Image (spheres, rainbow, N blue to C red):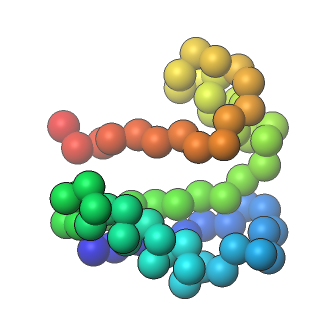
Amino acid sequence: MRVTVTRLVAVPELDDADLRRAASRALEHGNRADLPLDVVLTDDATLAELHGRCLGDPTPTDVMSFDLGD
């Protein structure tokens, strides 16, 4: 299982190892432990732009996910 963390903003209260561990456990729980996962920490403005461009809703959101499987 490969979980990478990319920081575009500083969030000191979130440790990379803790993020990778939580994401790995979530993948295991969902029976998707064999899939790679990229976690990107960014700001509200970037999230709103991506949310609008990719999902048609130009408001900030806490989480965006994309299944690139098929």
Q: Image point 55% across, 84% down: which residue? A: 17
Q: Image point 30% across, 42% down: which residue? A: 68
**Where residue 8 appears, x then y in whole percent?**
72, 61
Q: Is residue 15 visible?
A: yes
**Where residue 37 appears, x then y in whole percent?**
39, 61
- Name the residue at the front extreme: 29
**Where residue 54 appears, x then y in whole percent?**
53, 26
Viewer-closest of 52 and 31? 31
**How many numbered dots are placed on residues in this image?**
0
Q: Image point 46% across, 42% down: which residue? A: 65
Quadrant of image for the C terminus = top left
Viewer-closest of 58 and 25? 25
Quadrant of image for the N terminus = bottom left
Q: Image point 72% across, 53% down: which residue? A: 42
Q: Is residue 35 left or right of residue 38?
A: left
Viewer-closest of 2 and 28? 28
Q: Is residue 15 above or below residue 68?
A: below
Q: Is residue 58 left or right of residue 12?
A: left
Q: Is residue 41 left or right of residue 67?
A: right
Q: Is residue 35 visible?
A: no
Q: Is residue 36 above or below residue 66?
A: below
Q: Is residue 47 above or below residue 14?
A: above
**Where residue 18 appears, x then y in whole percent?**
56, 80
- Name the residue at the top extreme: 56
